[in-house]
Amino acid sequence: MKSLLLFLLLLASLNAKDVIYDTSTSLLWQDAYANDEFSLTYKEAQDYCADLVVEEYKDFRLPTLNELQSIIDYKNYKPAIIKGFRHVGNETYWTTTPYANDYDYVWTINFKKGARDVKAKHYDRNVRCVQKVK
């Protein structure tokens, strides 16, 4: 079932309004409906980002902990994210930053209040893809 949902999301028409460019970091963030509630295991999230195409934008990936932290605004609550993002759940989002070199765990951020935590890769978490713009 999850594979079918992933396939349908990839087929959905995404357009330029589904991305946000952060000029301070030169990062292009996915900001689509899927970011609200769509959750996947770590491996599924990596595959989803790798396959994501938004108009001419491709080469997406999961963000590092530092990259994902760069869009937190601790003055905001539910969600604790900088202005401009339209689609964000008060949920936990994946990063690629490993926890103490433990293969089964990575750092995550919960955008309800911007809290960092460590989660096992086999659970479902939300996804926000990113790419560095050159």
Image: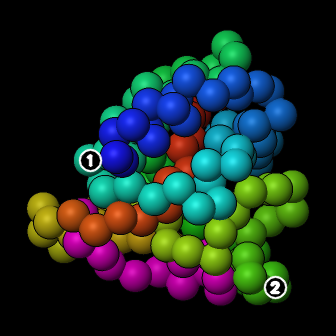
Distance between the Cα atoms at labels 1 and 2?
32 Å
Q: Residue furthest front?
A: 1
- Rendered residue at 62%/54% (across/down): 35
Residue 58 circle label = none
The one nearer the camera, 92 or 29, is: 92
Which span of residues is magenta-colored?
110-121
Residue 75 circle label = 2
Provide residue 58's location: percent of width, then percent of height.
55, 21
- Is residue 85 positioned above or below 3 on the image? below
Q: Amino acid at mark 2?
A: Lys
Q: On the picture, is 16 further left or further right than 131? A: right
Dividing the picture into quadrants, the one containing residue 20 is: top right
- Rendered residue at 36%/47% (across/down): 2
Provide residue 46's location: percent of width, then percent of height.
35, 42
Say which label, 1 or 2, has the lower sequence index: 1
- Is residue 130 positioned above or below 118 on the image? above
- Is residue 66 positioned above or below 115 on the image? above
Provide residue 53's location: percent of width, then percent of height.
57, 22
The one nearer the camera, 5 or 102, is: 5
Q: On the picture, is 51 further left or further right than 123? A: right
Query: To which residue does mark 1 refer?
Result: 43
- Rendered residue at 65%/86% (across/down): 113
Provide residue 109's location: percent of width, then percent of height.
50, 73
Looking at the rendered structure, the secondary structure element under dot 1 is: helix
The one nearer the camera, 42 or 29, is: 42
The one nearer the camera, 25 or 58, is: 58
Q: On the picture, is 119 further left or further right than 125? A: left
In the picture, the quarter occupied by the C terminus is top right
